[in-house]
Image: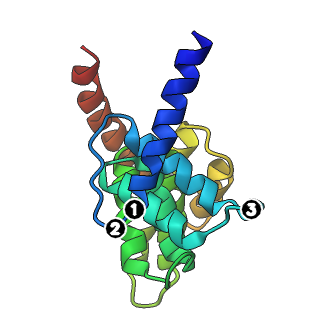
Amino acid sequence: MGIAFIGRWLSRFRKLDRFTGAGTEVQEPGEAEVLFSLGDTFADEDSKTHDPARALECYEKAASLGHAGAQCRLGVLYGQGGGSGQDEELALQWLCKAANQGHAEAQYHLGVRQTRASRVPQADTSECRAEAFKWLELATAQHFTGAEMARDFVAMQMTRKEIVEGGRRAVCFALAMAKVIKPLAQ
């Protein structure tokens, strides 16, 4: 059993060379997770293999395969300008994809972004706060670190009507996710 395990493990990592080549298509199940893990390895600032550009490349490939964690990391990287130039539009796009899959960290980051957006003079502040509350409530429900405090902070700046609306949106989102997940489990 030990030798077979090592053989499978090594064969997975031999395949990683082709993931870092340009134009390579990933087609095997589980490869998105391998790419995501490889991206984490390259993103680790304390590692000898730290390479933000390669991390970004691995995350992009995993994200294109629908990996919510990679989509979230891409959103954060593009928002911070890590691995490439800062691109707020791409950051928002990738965070939305991950958050809509139920990824708690992406939901947290979207909530924080909406909170910031509510402070922009030309923004619809009521709409931004309700959306911020929704995403932070969803992240809180998944016990994401810092989400509850952020949600409570946003709530202090909201009217009762905005809080109710944000909560309603969170419930609607959760119910919609339950309908999608339940048929898959059957």
Location of mark 3 (residue): 48
Could you tell me which secondary element the residue under label 3 belongs to? loop
Q: CA distance from mark 3 to mark 1?
A: 22 Å
Q: Residue at 28% of width from left, 65% of height from top?
A: 23
Q: Position of residue 28 (x, y in %)?
A: 30, 37
Residue in the picture at 57% in, 76% down: 82
Type of amino acid at the residue the image marks with label 3: Lys
Looking at the image, residue 75 lies above or below residue 122: above
Q: Which one is earlier in the sequence, the residue at label 2 or at label 1?
A: 2
Residue at image mark 1: 60
- 119, above or below 140, in the image: below
Give amino acid for label 2.
Ala
Labelled disc at residue 50: none
Looking at marks 2 and 3 on the same chain, the residue that comes earlier in the sequence is marked by 2
Give residue 153's position: percent from left, percent from top: 65, 61
Foreground disc of the pair 2, 1: 2
- Secondary structure category for the residue under label 2: loop
In terms of secondary structure, where does tag 1 sit? helix
Residue sitting nearer the eye, 186 or 28 = 28
- In the picture of the structure, the residue carrying the numbered disc 2 is 22
**Dividing the picture into quarters, in which one does residue 46 lie?**
bottom right
The three-letter code of the residue at mark 1 reads Glu
Q: Residue at x 44, y 65 (%)?
A: 57
Pair 3/1: label in front: 3
Q: Quadrant of the C terminus?
A: top left
Relative height, residue 147 to residue 172 (above, below): below
Colour mapping used in the image: rainbow
Q: How many marks?
A: 3
- Marks 2 and 3, how far apart in space? 23 Å
| Residue in front for this viewpoint, 4 or 129 | 4
The crowd level at tag 2 (other Cα within 10 Å; few <14, some 14-19, many 20+) is: few
